Amino acid sequence: MEEEKMKKSEVEKQVLEKVTNTISSINSAQSFNDVVLSLHSLASLLFSINSSSLSGVISKQYIEQLKNEEHPSESERRQLWEVFYRGVAFPTLARFLIYDVASNWLSRLPVEAQKLVYDIFFVKGLFTEVVQAVIPCLDHNAKAVRSNAERLVVICLLENEGVLQMARELGILHESEDSSQSAVKLTVSRVAQLVASVPDKSRLKAPKSLSSHYFFKNITTQLLAAAEEISLKAHGSNDVDVSFQFVGEMFTRICRRGSADLLLSELIPHILKRVRSFFSSHTDTNLEGGFMLDSSFKFWFLMMEIIKDAYAVEKMAEQILHQLVAECANDVEAYWVLWILFHRSFKLQTSVRFLFVEKFVLLKVFPLRCLKWILQFSVFGCPPEDGKLKNGENKQLLLETVQRVVVVWSKREFVQSAPLEQQVHVTAAAGLMLETMSKGELDATKDVMRSILEGVSCRLENPDDLVRKMACSIALVFSKVIDPNNPLYLDNSFKEENVDWEFGLATANPTNRNSENKEIAAPSSNSVQKLEVDHEGESIRGRKVNAAKKRSSKCKLVDSLDVIAPSTLNDELLFSDEEDGNSSEDSEGSSDSSLQPYDLTDDDSDLKKKISQLVDIVGALRKTDDPDGGGVSA
């Protein structure tokens, strides 16, 4: 052992001395022929070079010198290569090549000579060392240095699949006895950070392949190839080697750079293709066991578990769901893709469980299909059946989740302040879970019934058509859980068996929704009694929406003593016969840009009055449109 160390030390000394001599000879070179000869003398020790390629490129007298050079054996060359790249020799030479040679000689070298004696030190080198030498030069001030660094990055990382090569190198490094775990992890982090920074470091006129889209797309393809190799290598083992860590770190860095969508647009079609292939070749019912035995999924079982960056996990999970929609995955396929990627981390990491069960259900907004997949995987914990959500064995998780969701849904503050899209999302989550529950399970929850009644009550008081629809839908589903044979329809115009949890927003133009509010028939007194809602003595009633009142809430507050020009009010409040001659008296389709009352026939004398104070305006806007004399509450 001691003898080997001494021998290795001697070789390192010889290599470093050779590098020093090469640098010295180039500094004193008189022509590019001298530079080529000096670099060739070093390169021939490390690589197998076809020197005859330089014939016709450099002068004949130099060709004779090349032929007279001694070449080491393959075993000696391999030893020299290891010492050169894993020691201080390569960083020393690389700095000289990148800064001095690139600035003074590179433009004078013939292309063939450049490839053979200059590029070879980078292209045939140890890529974990090459990227640490080249990438920091991308933002150098000198144009020659910067453009040469861009060229080397394209050649090394893209054309020669440097990222895939690094994954392999790091796997070998992990197995080496000479490398400590802390040093290896530091190298992984450093290299991943440098690779991910390439698009940001590249100048505006850099090659197009270094732009964020093209660069990360190419890198992702290489990472997928690395994942395949790792899966085959790791079959039968749950150990996470450095190659795993490197790919995971690269995924994290790409997400951090804002390209999670691009990353997952490559990953999900790849995984989905394998899942579909698996389904076509497996007919047994134990799909979970089949996936566990398939070596091609091994990497993906462990991948999300080793990504510790919560932001990256969240962005990847979001994009996984969106990409599954883009790839037209069915419910079963989507469930198993989520299971493959997250079943281990969901079980072992609280942050992942919180992400799916809390954040994705209560704080984010997803398409309805995605919401169903989220609930099926994280709450129900089993594959769907016959295209419908299926209740799993973990009843306690379902009850706890329903409790949390319904409590949030019932809060008056949530109804008043949350965006309508989020309210639709949370309403759908509550409704979808309620649809799978039995009366016994509902009885086992704490305060769910009271929360539902409170939520229905405050929504029915809301003037927004969509908000009241949410109340009616939850009330209907709730009534079916209590008594399936006696469904409760608070909206007489809604008699459908299945609730549309998108409430028509998937196809409707959202910009037209507010201007095309439709009335919801008022619930009967019997319906209210059946819901058993007592909100401080006021029964829940559906009311017509006074459009003028709704618009007045958007008006800027004005001091009540300020005088408003009557002519202005006449222009805004009085209908034009030409504009509204074809409109019915009780139409709700009038323009949102005016302050015209909902029903002119209600009190024509008041409307024709010259109003000069804000108090009078408020009074006019509060005028009833109810033929029975009931006003719209403030």
Image (cartoon, rainbow, N blue to C red):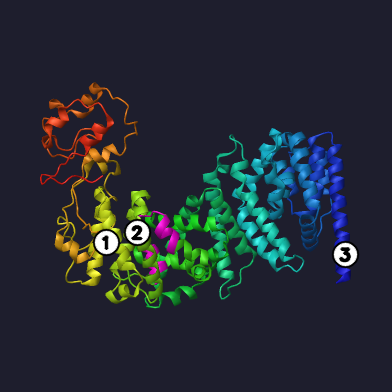
Q: Which residues make up the magenta segment?
A: 357-381
Residues marked 2 and 1 touching at CB (< 8 Å) = yes
Extreme-front residue of the structure: 561
Q: Position of residue 192 (x, y in %)?
A: 63, 54
Left or right placement of residue 250 versus residue 381 in this view: right
Q: Is residue 367 magenta?
A: yes
Viewer-side residue, 468 vs 119: 468
Secondary structure beneath disc 2? Answer: helix
Q: Is residue 552 magenta?
A: no
Q: CA distance from mark 3 to mark 2?
A: 73 Å
Q: CA distance from mark 2 to mark 1?
A: 10 Å
Residue 294 seen by the camera: yes
**Residue designated by label 3:** 7
Q: Residue, x 28% and y 70% (percent of image)?
A: 386
Residue 323 seen by the camera: no
Viewer-side residue, 51 vs 425: 425
Q: Position of residue 122 (x, y in %)?
A: 70, 49
Q: Is residue 396 above or below residue 620?
A: below
Left or right placement of residue 61 versus residue 255 in this view: right
Q: Is residue 577 above or below residue 90?
A: above
Q: Position of residue 556 (x, y in %)?
A: 34, 33
Q: Residue, x 58% and y 53% (percent of image)?
A: 253
Left or right placement of residue 179 versus residue 346 in this view: right
